[in-house]
Image (cartoon, rainbow, N blue to C red):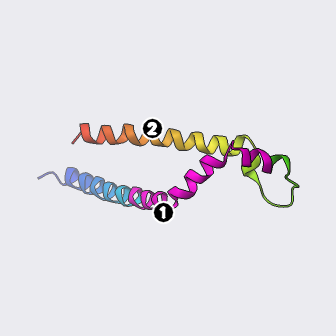
């Protein structure tokens, strides 16, 4: 019996369980907000977005009407989706 190995693997088991729990929470949160996220994606660059941008009077917070913030956020979402596909493939290959 190798106590160091068992201790290390126990630590890895706890880490794995915690990581899975965190990912599951994030997935549930995404699913809960998925419709809103897709609405955001459809709004950015739409005719409504251009109209709102042209008529904006600076009276409310409106980072959505900037070009960079929503673009960068949606690109990050796209990159995340690719990372999730890659990660899922890697997990299945290493089972």
Q: Residues within 10 Å of mark 2 (few under 14, many from 20)?
A: few
Q: Position of residue 2 (x, y in %)?
A: 15, 51
Of helix, strand and loop, which one carries label 1? Answer: helix
Q: Residue at x 48, y 57 (%)?
A: 30
Judging by the rendered image, the residue that carries numbered circle 2 is 82
Pointers 2 and 1 in contact (CB under 8 A)?
Answer: no
Q: Nearer the viewer, residue 90 or 46?
A: 46
Alpha carbons under labels 2 and 1: distance apart: 20 Å
The mark lying in front, picked from 2 and 1, is 1
Q: Residue at x 38, y 40 (%)?
A: 85
Taking the view exactly as shown, the residue that stands out farthest to the right is 57
Q: Nearer the viewer, residue 95 or 14?
A: 95
Q: Quadrant of the C terminus?
A: top left
Magenta stretch?
Answer: 23-52
Q: Main secondary structure of the magenta part?
A: helix
**Looking at the image, is mark 2 or mark 1 earlier in the sequence?**
1
Judging by the rendered image, the residue that carries numbered circle 1 is 32
């Amino acid at each position: 019996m190798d106590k160091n190995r068992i201790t290390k693997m126990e630590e890895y088991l706890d880490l794995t369980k915690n990581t899975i729990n965190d990912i599951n929470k994030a997935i549930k949160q995404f699913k809960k907000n998925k419709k809103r996220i897709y609405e955001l994606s459809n709004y950015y660059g739409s005719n409504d977005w251009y109209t709102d941008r042209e008529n904006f009077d600076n009276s409310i917070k409106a980072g959505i009407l900037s070009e960079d913030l929503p673009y960068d956020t949606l690109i990050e979402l796209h990159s995340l989706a690719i990372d999730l596909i890659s990660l899922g493939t890697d997990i299945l290959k290493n089972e």
